């Protein structure tokens, strides 16, 4: 039953967790590369921490924004929009050449973390 795609609520469940997995992958894709980025750009620990804070700040902002938007636009449309928008800074991470650039890119990559709201909303809506 759990792996079935026959019923609409199960299709929504599988689409929801898979989209959240992609967003989570985008959100944390840069984390294992931080030591290499720090060495190659000559960044201090404070600059790395600032970029980490920016990443979480983007997520917090999106969670507050996306909650009410789920009521008006629906989670599927928002999921698509957030994943598409967060793919752009993820693809541009190779162009970073300063601490400011890293912080700004990580702020926009943090937008992907807001997909938790849509995942929970979509799944809850289908199973209630």
Image (cartoon, grey):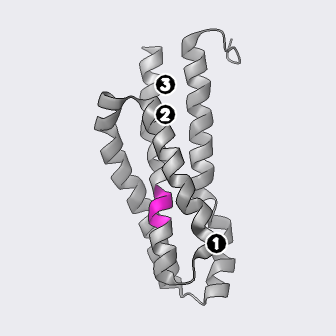
Residue drawn at (60%, 58%), measured in percent from left and top? 28
Mark 1 vs mark 2: in front: 1
Cα–Cα span, label 3 and label 2? 6 Å
Judging by the rendered image, the residue that carries numbered circle 2 is 119
What's the CA distance linking mark 1 and mark 2?
29 Å
Magenta-highlighted residues: 106-110
Instruction: Give the CA separation, mark 3 to mark 1.
Output: 35 Å
Q: Classify mark 2: residues with Cα within 10 Å, few (<14), some (14-19) or many (20+).
A: many
Label for residue 48? Answer: none
| Residue drawn where x is 46% and y is 42% of the image | 81
User: Which element is circle 2 on?
Assistant: helix
Which quarter of the rendering shows the C terminus?
A: top left
Comparing 51 with 75, the one in front is 75
Q: Earlier in the sequence, mark 1 or mark 2?
A: 1
Residue 115: x percent and y percent? 47, 42
Residue, x 60% and y 9% (percent of image)?
7
Residue 94 circle label: 1
């Amino acid at each position: 039953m759990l792996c079935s795609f026959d019923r609409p609520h199960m299709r929504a469940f599988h689409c929801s967790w898979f989209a959240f997995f992609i967003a989570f992958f985008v959100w944390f894709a840069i984390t294992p590369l931080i030591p290499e980025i720090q060495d190659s750009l000559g960044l201090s620990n404070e600059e790395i921490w600032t970029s980490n804070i920016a990443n979480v700040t983007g997520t917090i902002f999106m969670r507050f924004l996306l909650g009410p938007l789920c009521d008006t636009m629906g989670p599927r449309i928002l999921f698509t929009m957030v994943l598409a928008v967060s793919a752009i800074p993820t693809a541009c991470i190779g162009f970073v050449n300063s601490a400011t650039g890293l912080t700004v890119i990580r702020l926009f990559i943090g937008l992907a973390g807001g997909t938790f709201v849509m995942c929970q909303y979509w799944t809850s809506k289908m199973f209630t």
